[in-house]
Amino acid sequence: MSFTSKISFENLSSFQNIRISSGKNLILFTKVDKELCLDEWDYYLNFLPEFLQKDIIKYYRWQDRQNTLFGKLLIYAGYYMIYNRKIDFNNYSKSAYGKPQMENIGFEFNISHSGEMVVCAFSKEKVGIDIEQIIDIDIECFNSVFTSDEFKEIKSKKGFKFYEYWTAKEAVVKAIGLGLSLPLSEIRIMRDYVSYKDIKWFKEKIIFDNYFCTNVSPVKSVKSDIIEVKF
């Protein structure tokens, strides 16, 4: 992976177009560390169509509203960086299991957020991404979602190992798009990939300060351009 650059959302047109291909993904991220003032909120919200605005303002906490807003704006930014034109969100929808999707845009995407971080992955293949803030937790509460071997390794190595395994499983769930109907315990962590029903998902690990992120793809040796979008 390579952290290539930062770009301002206001200057998307000045950025050289990004090419995504089999084995070459794009990951955009942003940090949401303060509440927007009313003028800023209205400005960014109006980049989206009314039906998405209504979905966003339903959230009670400002952090949830803004994380959801900036997740959509990362889709906007990624599309602009790939095609050098604005996206039409009118074909945006969610699957029966709640996975965001858009038809006929030439790529797959997936969004995740945790704490102050929002990430969005773009790929020509199916893609899943999950990010988690690294905090002190009681890992015993999660033993049912790991195999016995996975849980032994988590307990013996501690540190990032829980988040490495957890985000890998969650990323596969999101890539497949079956939501909570897919048991995490049936997703197996292997050395170089994650498997579910004999299908391999190759993982890319990313660490942002105190956040652990995993991006998965059916393509081996996937590499991503990782770019921060500043709002």
Image (cartoon, rainbow, N blue to C red):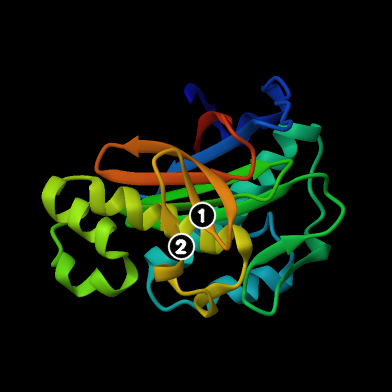
| Rendering coords of residue 91 (x, y %) | 83, 64
For disc 1, the marked residue is 195
State which quadrant residue 81 falls in: top right
Q: What type is the residue that disc 2 sits on?
A: Ile
Comparing 27 with 73, the one in front is 27
What is the number of the mark on residue 58?
none
| Rendering coords of residue 79 (x, y %) | 73, 41
Residue 102 in sight from this viewpoint = yes
Residue at x-position 39% and y-position 40%: 191
Task: Report the label total.
Answer: 2
For residue 160, side relative to residue 82 (left or right):
left
* CB within 8 Å, label 1 to label 2: yes
For residue 68, side relative to residue 81 (left or right):
left
State which quadrant residue 113 falls in: bottom left
**Badge 1 or badge 2: first in the primary sequence:** 2
Residue at x-position 67% and y-position 40%: 78
Q: What type is the residue that disc 1 sits on?
A: Ser
For disc 2, the marked residue is 187
* Crowd around label 2: few <14 · some 14–19 · many ≥20 (10 Å): many
* Crowd around label 1: few <14 · some 14–19 · many ≥20 (10 Å): some
Q: Say above or below: 13 vs 120.
A: above
Residue at x-position 43% and y-position 58%: 188
